[in-house]
Image: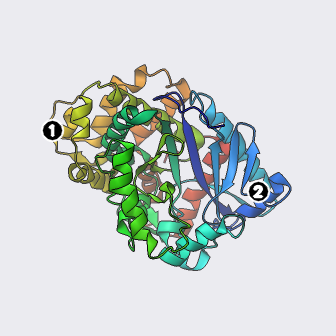
Amino acid sequence: MRRRALRLFEGYGVEIEYMIVDVSTLDVLPVADEVLRAAAGRYENEFEAGPVAWSNELVLHVMEIKNKGPVPSLEGLAGEFQDSVVRINGILEGLGGKLMPSGMHPWMDPSEETRLWPRRNRKIYATYDRIFDCRNHGWANIQSVHLNLPFRGDAEFGRLHAAIRLVIPLMPAVASSSPIVGGKISGLMDSRLYYYSENQRKVPFITGKVIPEPVFTRDEYESKILKKIYRGIAKYDRERVLGYEWLNSRGAIPRFDRSTVEIRMLDVQECPLADMALAVSIAAVIRALVEERWSGVREQQAWGVGPLLHVLEATMRFGEKAVIEDPSYLRSFGLSLRRATALDVWKHLQEEVLLHDPLFEDETAGAMNVILDKGPLSRRILRAAGRKPGRLRLGRVYESLCDCLMNGEMFPG
């Protein structure tokens, strides 16, 4: 029986992708299928561990943890995810591995180390690989957190999609954790998003500009976006293996099959507590926009892709230090300024929204304070790594991140 579609903010879903690495070298270790076999007693794509589930991803060195269905509140979910991290690490200990957080592996060579998922649903992954060649950073080395928010009907979708589009450019300022690529400082605070935006260049409309277009009904979305995506992929995918709405790879994608919008903008943090702090914060700001706290829905829906992309490109490169010089954008969040840093905006939002939101518990508030006071995880990684980090220094930094993940602690940098 089809589940009743939830109304706005009646439920939440979170998915977190972790790398599996060798316990001694921290190189990627392709054993996700063996972890699931050890847990389930046979090779499976998914294993239910209480209120959360573990599942495979495109590559064998990545494991996803997610809540099994929408939950009415994010309260307590960090603890459930943390329990699974500890349990998976217990299994990995016997395989010579452990979980590593952050948005990208700091020295992985995807051309040599990529191993695709070889079991059930492998045809999907093989099709992606045949068309786009998945042995590159944009496919094999991008670990993200997905936040799912529900809607019921076009009116709610239109309000939710408009609000999410406005918040997307601010997300890397607090959620970036991928400043190191190929053993070197990349020059971007959010390298994962850069590679994500480039990974389907053969059919560029699949990802678009990452910022979703201003489309606010299901019929309009299907005609203006999804049908164009399907037409673009058709000549490469005659069997229609990929011809479904999940092929859409914008920074937030509506899943009309389950009446949710899936936000894909967040790098993985150092522990589930930090991921949940960001999820709660972003949901709270989106909710304030949906409630028209600072701007009306028509005003929100009027924003085109270009101005939002300009802000996003700045936060991807500079993180919380990005300067926003668009007074209209700042007014959308209640700031009467001609220019402000992304950190200024987030501190304003903390005072206006986060400190008063019922979802914001003491633990998540504390984690968010670390992010706003000491910078996003990318900033703290760079501070710990130094200006020209070698492999030994990077190893120490990412070993510390693995410890933070195992112990459920924030990384001070």
In the picture, measured across the screen, residue 403 lies left or right of residue 157, that is right
Of the image marks 1 and 2, the number of the one nearer the N terminus: 2
Q: CA distance from mark 1 to mark 2?
A: 50 Å
Q: Quadrant of the N terminus?
A: top right
Query: Residue at horizontal 79%, vertical 61%?
Result: 43
Query: Residue at horizontal 38%, vertical 33%?
Result: 286
Q: What secondary structure is marked by label 1?
A: helix
**Looking at the rendering, which quadrant does residue 98 occupy?**
bottom right
Q: What secondary structure is marked by label 2?
A: helix
Residue 181 higher or lower than 292, as above or below: below
Task: Categorize mark 1 by other alpha carbons within 10 Å: few (<14), some (14-19), many (20+).
Answer: some
Can residue 234 be seen? Answer: yes
Name the one closer to the observer, 401 or 283.
283
Mark 1 belongs to which amino acid? Pro
Name the one closer to the observer, 277 or 64.
64
x, y percentage for residue 41?
Answer: 86, 55
Reading the image, the residue beneath label 2 is: 36
In the picture, measured across the screen, residue 355 lies left or right of residue 299, that is right
**Rendered image coloring scheme:** rainbow
Query: Residue at horizontal 82%, vertical 56%?
Result: 38
x, y percentage for residue 20?
Answer: 66, 60
- Foreground: disc 1 or disc 2: 2
Mark 2 belongs to which amino acid? Leu
Reading the image, the residue beneath label 1 is: 327
Name the one closer to the observer, 323 or 229.
229
